[in-house]
Image: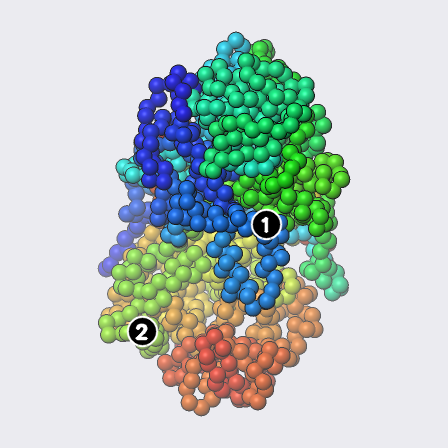
């Protein structure tokens, strides 16, 4: 019921919204919960386990009951807290966990079966028979699990991540937070003030207590206006700080557009749903406030039973009275304000029930002292409560009970770095331990200081401490006068009596469940939590943790500090996966690297292959070719018979210079490079420190102190980091400098018997066997552009690699293709490149798989005996040179041509196909058009000694089981005349 | 005779204007990595000053001005942007041509810092990261160099092959910032 | 987590690549046990540990970072080039 003239939203714009299809009116600035209460809607949802009718309990992010679903399809958000969701024109919300409707829910039958569903129900029930686990129990549990449901469609919304930096992060904008931000801001510190609510002010918006002689919310507005005007202060509303991490890093979730309608102009379609902030703060002031805790009594979960502080918030902030005949039940003085405020607003107070005999008298309404509420009645909303006092039990008619068991300081963030809160006996609450998070100071209610004056004082003091550490001076300022009432409270956790008294509303955990856990010896608070599921719902027990462990303490005969708390972990409020993974969808998932030839090969219809981040042409289908093998075979044949062009720019290229460059390379490679002549290229092998092969490639000597190293595409980054390590950590005294030039050069392989002819006229110089001998290199002018030429071959053919600055890459690629095509050649892709190198027994990272040694590759001769090199000591270990290691060989079909597949395992014919008989595995396979056979490279025990033998090849994945002949890994032109000629 | 045609890294991708911010490709001319040899930093600094009129930049700083700039480029390295380095510098430092290795763009306008805050994990607030400050960092998983060239303008560099991703990521962030108004 | 790179200043951990314990490399000709220790054997203290981090997305420096594995406090950061990890030569 909306009370005219009440609330801070006087004159706000009316808004139409719908709940479960029913259209209603609210006001701008309302939360959905406020608007529902204004429309006298109390039944909002059904509870998780028993499908009990539930209504709004709180007015904040701790809400366990009023969870709704908003949106449909790819824009459906389940478990939205109605107490946080702001109203917007056209908002449509639906109840969850009920069918066919929230009023008539079929599964409410669960409530009747409650005696069977106590703590440990799942553990005891879904035990046997084992055959039921997968087929019966799991689907059953999955079906029952969860509250709201996802649509099953891909999320259509945008999310983003962002970074922010500040001197002081102030968390919470109540009196303590505002005072801290003001003090720090005035002193010139860079401040970020985060508030999870849509409006700053915290409890000042919900209370009528004055600050400096004016209403608290007016004081807050003035402070905010001053903060807003400061360049060094950033105000972030709708932003919940979710976690505290190492070295002053904080996570925060900003709800960017949950409060806006979804149909949109182009402009707002770019607006993210949420933004996940990583805030690096030198210091933080935690002023997160406190959360009021319910009292457990029989049927304390009916709609209309709410937190006393929340009732004040609905009244004072939104002008909404949640009932016409209200009762208050409390164990502390503060809750009496609820009765006072409602009474002043003209709402009838049926009674105030205080568990303390020495409770204050309050106003002109009945205060029943030393009494407890021991039950409630009503169908879909509370209709009456039962009060037990010295006079016996009496029934009081009421449509809203405002309850308060005291306040729990929001210590959550102080526990994220492993600290535990400490019990404060006066406040009957856990408060943060000092220094829990390095750089963080706590202030106000989250520190167990509940008066407004105390919060202001603590906020100013916290800022003072931070400013001192920052070497800044706080401006002298008097604290405004404010309410400084003592926090009088007497312990009351659960009202004794029969029936179910709720602790955890969201997961339906009752006092009885916790006691049962204790009886069954789940005495540790961590065990109790997991056995009963208390605190494991989306509210993470914000309302229920302390009461639950108080009940556990009582049941186990321990004190509350002895019982301890469970561990608070991030996030403080639920964070959507969308926000966590923001930006990492579609093209944002990882960078894409494109070759200069990409556009041209794409135009030619090349199929692209992802190689790390690179996109490379796999093959170039021609008209009439129906599968990749036809294209690949043709391209291989083109290279063998004419000339082929392939972009090889993805290979890592590292420019190395300096007086010690040769020495450096000698140490990196197993073989010697300091003796390489200028103008020549040498193949090299690099080991890891453990003696296994890391990478291979060619290195060219361009000058006395100038080399260019080539790495494999896959290991380019790894080799660079490795070289930096050697140069920085191991031999900083060596005078050598290197840098990646992978991106500077577009480099193309020109391979095949007609390659020299193709280069004729392309280069300014004459290309012949003397100017460019096999493994020669040097500068060359390519169509007037200064480039480089390397006579190297990865195909076994007479071949060159020609490089130009990348800006000319596309143009040169087109020119090379034009020339190649004119002489019967053309482009070849990765598939053909792979077949060409397998035919020659040349290795890639399919072979260099981290478990192979130079010996396994038959390259032990490349390990120099004359010099030291990285990995030398460990490579000499006996086991790494053992004859029976799996060593590289070639495979071809024995008899009729069958398939050879990479990943297949090898067995001695006659042996069982079992792991212990495994003789090796295939690393690379392809079809050789030259041989007319499928061929492969493999590692086989004692491989080179078994040439000519027959092995059995088994590939369970692809259903291949065939016999192969072990052959030399060099299938084609074993003498190498073609490349050298 | 055929002639090779040059193409810039962001060819066909830029310029773009979104919400009062502009994203344009820079054509800085020559770009050479200068890596002083052991013990040569001082001598090199003098030679650089004499040849090109700018100091060798300290870590996280850029020297010179638009058109002729030396940007600190990581450990023991600066990137000379604009002129090709004087041959005499080769005595003191390894010189490596990188003119074609990097895509260089300029992000300018109100909100540029907010855009970068969505992509770069470095403190770029104006009081911390001033004109002439530079950072080697990442831009959404890409190795990057970010330099403030004005109150609301930044020079951003990533590997040439990633130009398309750079433009995509920057435009996406620009749209999101612009949408917030 | 944030690490203060001696060259770049304080940076988010996402810019760094972690390699493991920072150990002094055995000299050329050291026996196999010394190499085994260097390559394979690791202490796993709940407390300060010297680690190698590579500022891969920053300045390319290798760093020796002394970090308390129990509290995650970073006690010292040094350039690997000044940490004497190359051992006797």
The residues bearing labels 2 and 1 have C-alpha atoms spaced at a distance of: 66 Å
Say whether marks 2 and 1 touch (CB < 8 Å): no
Looking at the image, is mark 2 or mark 1 earlier in the sequence? Answer: 1
Question: Which quadrant of the rendered structure holds the N terminus of chain A?
Answer: top left
Which callout, 2 or 1, points to the residue nearer the camera?
Answer: 1
Residue that numbered label 1 is attached to: A115
| Residue plotted at (50% across, 52% down) | A145
Numbered-mark total: 2
Q: Nearer the viewer, residue A879 or A169?
A: A169
Please name the residue shown 42% across and 89% down the image: A896
Residue A18's spot in the image, x, y percent? 34, 36
Residue A367 falls in image quadrant: top right
Q: In this view, does A873 lie above or below A933?
A: above
Q: Mark 2 points at which residue?
A: A627
Q: Judging from the image, what secondary structure is the residue with disc 2 in? A: loop
Relative image position of residue A467 (x, y in whole percent): 61, 21
Label 1: chain?
A
Residue A936 point in image, percent of width and height: 47, 78
- Seen in the picture, residue A145 relative to A571 is either above or below; the reply is below
Residue A302 seen = yes
Question: Foreground: A384 or A25?
Answer: A384
Residue under mark 2: which chain is it in? A
Assess disc 2: are there few (<14), some (14-19) or many (≥20) residues with their C-alpha within 10 Å of its C-alpha.
few
Residue B88 visible somewhere in the drawing = no
Kindly identify the residue that appears in the image at 59 percent across and 80 percent down: A914
- A456 sits to left or right of A796: right
The chosen color scheme is rainbow
Q: Which of A871 and A53 is in front in this view?
A: A53
């Amino acid at each position: 019921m909306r009370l005219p003239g009440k609330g801070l939203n006087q004159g706000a714009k009316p808004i139409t919204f719908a709940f479960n299809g029913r259209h209603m009116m609210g006001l701008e600035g309302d939360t959905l919960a406020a608007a529902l209460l204004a429309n006298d809607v109390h039944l909002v949802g059904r509870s998780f386990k028993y499908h009990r009718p539930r209504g709004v309990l709180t007015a904040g992010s701790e809400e366990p009951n009023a969870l709704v679903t908003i949106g449909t399809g790819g824009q459906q958000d389940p478990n939205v807290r109605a107490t946080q969701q702001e109203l917007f024109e056209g908002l449509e919300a639906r109840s969850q966990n009920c069918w066919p409707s929230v009023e008539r829910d079929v599964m409410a039958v669960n409530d009747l079966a409650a005696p069977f569903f106590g703590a440990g129900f799942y553990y005891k029930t879904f035990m046997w028979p084992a055959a039921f686990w997968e087929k019966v129990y799991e689907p059953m549990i999955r079906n029952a699990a969860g509250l709201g449901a996802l649509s099953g469609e891909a999320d259509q919304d945008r999310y983003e991540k962002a970074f922010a930096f500040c001197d002081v992060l102030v968390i919470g904008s109540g009196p303590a937070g505002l005072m801290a931000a003001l003090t720090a801001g005035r002193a010139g510190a860079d401040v970020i003030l985060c508030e999870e609510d849509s409006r700053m002010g915290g409890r000042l918006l919900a209370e009528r207590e004055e600050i400096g002689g004016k209403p608290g919310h007016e004081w807050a507005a003035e402070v905010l206006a001053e903060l807003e005007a400061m360049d060094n202060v950033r105000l972030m509303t709708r932003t919940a700080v979710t976690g505290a991490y190492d070295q002053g890093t904080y996570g925060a979730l900003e709800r960017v557009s949950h409060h806006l309608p979804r149909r949109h102009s182009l402009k707002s379609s770019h607006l993210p749903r949420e933004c996940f902030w990583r805030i690096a703060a030198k210091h933080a002031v935690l002023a997160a406030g406190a959360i009021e805790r319910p009292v457990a009594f029989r049927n304390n979960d009916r709609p209309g039973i709410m937190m006393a502080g929340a009732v004040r918030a609905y009244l004072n902030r939104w002008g909404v009275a949640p009932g016409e005949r209200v009762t208050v039940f409390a164990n502390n003085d503060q809750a009496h304000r609820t009765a006072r405020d409602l009474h002043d607003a003209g709402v009838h107070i049926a009674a105030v029930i205080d568990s303390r005999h020495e409770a204050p008298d309050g106003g002109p309404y009945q205060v029943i002292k030393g009494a407890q509420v021991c039950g409630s009645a009503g169908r879909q909303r509370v209709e009456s409560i039962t009060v037990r006092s010295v006079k016996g039990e009496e029934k009081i008619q009421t449509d809203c009970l405002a309850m308060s068991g005291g306040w729990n300081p929001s210590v959550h963030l102080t526990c994220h770095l492993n600290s535990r809160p400490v019990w404060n006996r006066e406040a009957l609450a856990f408060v943060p331990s000092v220094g829990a998070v390095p750089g963080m100071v706590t202030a106000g209610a989250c520190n167990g200081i509940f008066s407004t004056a105390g919060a202001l004082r603590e906020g100013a003091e916290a800022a003072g401490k931070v400013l001192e550490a920052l070497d800044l001076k706080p401006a002298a300022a008097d604290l405004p006068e404010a309410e400084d009432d003592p926090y009088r409270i007497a312990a009351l956790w659960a009202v004794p009596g029969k029936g179910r008294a709720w602790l955890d509303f969201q997961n339906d955990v009752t006092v009885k469940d916790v006691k049962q856990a204790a009886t069954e010896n789940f005495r540790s608070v961590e065990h109790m939590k997991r056995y009963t599921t208390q605190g494991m719902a989306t509210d993470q027990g914000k309302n229920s943790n302390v009461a639950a462990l108080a009940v556990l303490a009582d049941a186990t005969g321990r004190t509350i500090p002895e019982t301890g708390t469970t561990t608070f972990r991030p996030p403080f409020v639920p964070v959507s996966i969308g926000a966590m993974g923001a930006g990492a969808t579609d093209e944002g998932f990882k960078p894409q690297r494109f070759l200069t030839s990409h556009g041209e090969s794409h135009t030619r219809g090349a199929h692209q292959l992802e190689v790390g981040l690179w996109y490379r042409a796999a093959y170039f289908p021609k008209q009439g070719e129906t599968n990749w093998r036809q294209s690949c075979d043709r391209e291989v044949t083109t290279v063998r018979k004419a000339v082929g062009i392939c972009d090889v720019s993805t290979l890592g290229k590292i420019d190395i210079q300096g007086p010690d460059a040769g020495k450096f390379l000698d140490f990196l490679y197993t073989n010697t490079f300091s003796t390489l002549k200028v103008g020549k290229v040498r193949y090299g092998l690099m080991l890891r420190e453990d003696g296994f092969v890391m990478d291979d490639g060619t290195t060219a000597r361009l000058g006395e102190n100038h080399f260019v190293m080539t790495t494999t595409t896959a290991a380019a980054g790894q080799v660079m980091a490795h070289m930096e390590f050697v140069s920085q950590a191991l031999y900083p005294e060596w005078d050598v400098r290197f840098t990646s030039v992978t991106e500077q050069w577009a480099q193309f392989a020109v391979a095949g018997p007609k390659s020299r002819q193709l280069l004729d006229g392309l280069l300014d110089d004459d290309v012949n066997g003397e100017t460019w001998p096999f493994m020669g290199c040097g500068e060359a002018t390519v169509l007037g552009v200064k480039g480089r030429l390397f006579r190297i071959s990865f195909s076994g053919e007479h071949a060159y690699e020609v490089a130009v600055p990348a800006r000319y890459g596309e143009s040169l690629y087109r020119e090379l293709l034009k020339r190649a095509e004119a002489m019967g050649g053309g482009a070849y892709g990765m598939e053909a490149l792979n077949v060409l190198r397998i035919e020659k027994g040349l290795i890639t990272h399919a072979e260099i798989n981290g478990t192979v040694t130079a010996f396994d590759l038959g390259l032990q001769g490349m390990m120099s005996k004359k010099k030291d090199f990285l990995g030398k000591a460990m490579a000499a270990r006996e086991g790494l040179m053992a004859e029976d290691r799996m060593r590289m060989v070639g495979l071809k079909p024995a008899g009729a041509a069958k398939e050879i597949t990479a990943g297949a395992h090898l067995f001695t014919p006659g042996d069982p196909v079992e792991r212990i008989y495994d003789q090796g595995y295939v690393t690379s396979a392809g079809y050789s058009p030259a041989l007319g056979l499928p061929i492969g490279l493999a590692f086989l025990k004692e491989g080179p000694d078994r040439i000519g033998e027959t092995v059995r090849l088994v590939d369970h994945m692809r259903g291949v089981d065939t016999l192969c002949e072990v052959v030399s890994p060099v299938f084609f032109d074993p003498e190498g005349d073609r490349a050298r000629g | 005779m055929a002639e090779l045609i040059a193409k810039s890294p962001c060819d066909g991708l830029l310029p773009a204007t979104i919400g009062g911010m502009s994203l344009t490709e820079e054509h800085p001319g020559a770009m050479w990595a200068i890596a002083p040899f052991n013990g040569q930093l001082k001598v090199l600094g003098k030679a650089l000053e004499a040849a090109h009129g700018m100091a060798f930049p300290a870590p996280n700083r850029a020297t010179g001005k638009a058109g002729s700039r030396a940007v600190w480029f990581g450990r023991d390295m600066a990137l000379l942007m604009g002129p090709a380095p004087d041959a005499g510098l080769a005595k003191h430092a390894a010189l490596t041509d990188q003119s074609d290795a990097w895509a260089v763009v300029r992000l300018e306008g109100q909100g540029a810092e907010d855009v970068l805050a969505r992509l770069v994990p470095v403190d770029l607030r104006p009081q911390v990261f001033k004109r002439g400050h530079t950072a080697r960092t990442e831009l959404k998983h890409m190795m990057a160099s970010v330099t403030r060239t004005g109150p609301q303008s930044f020079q951003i560099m990533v590997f040439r092959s990633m130009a398309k991703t750079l433009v995509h990521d920057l435009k996406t962030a620009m749209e999101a910032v612009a949408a917030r108004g | 987590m944030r690490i203060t790179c001696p060259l770049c200043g304080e940076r988010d951990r996402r810019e760094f690549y972690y390699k493991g314990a920072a150990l002094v490399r055995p000299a050329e000709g050291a026996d196999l046990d010394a190499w085994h220790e260097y390559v394979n054997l690791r202490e796993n203290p709940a407390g300060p540990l010297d680690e190698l981090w590579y500022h891969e997305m920053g300045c390319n420096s290798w760093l020796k970072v002394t970090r308390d594995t129990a509290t995650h406090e970073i006690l010292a950061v040094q350039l690997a080039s000044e940490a004497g990890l190359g051992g006797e030569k």
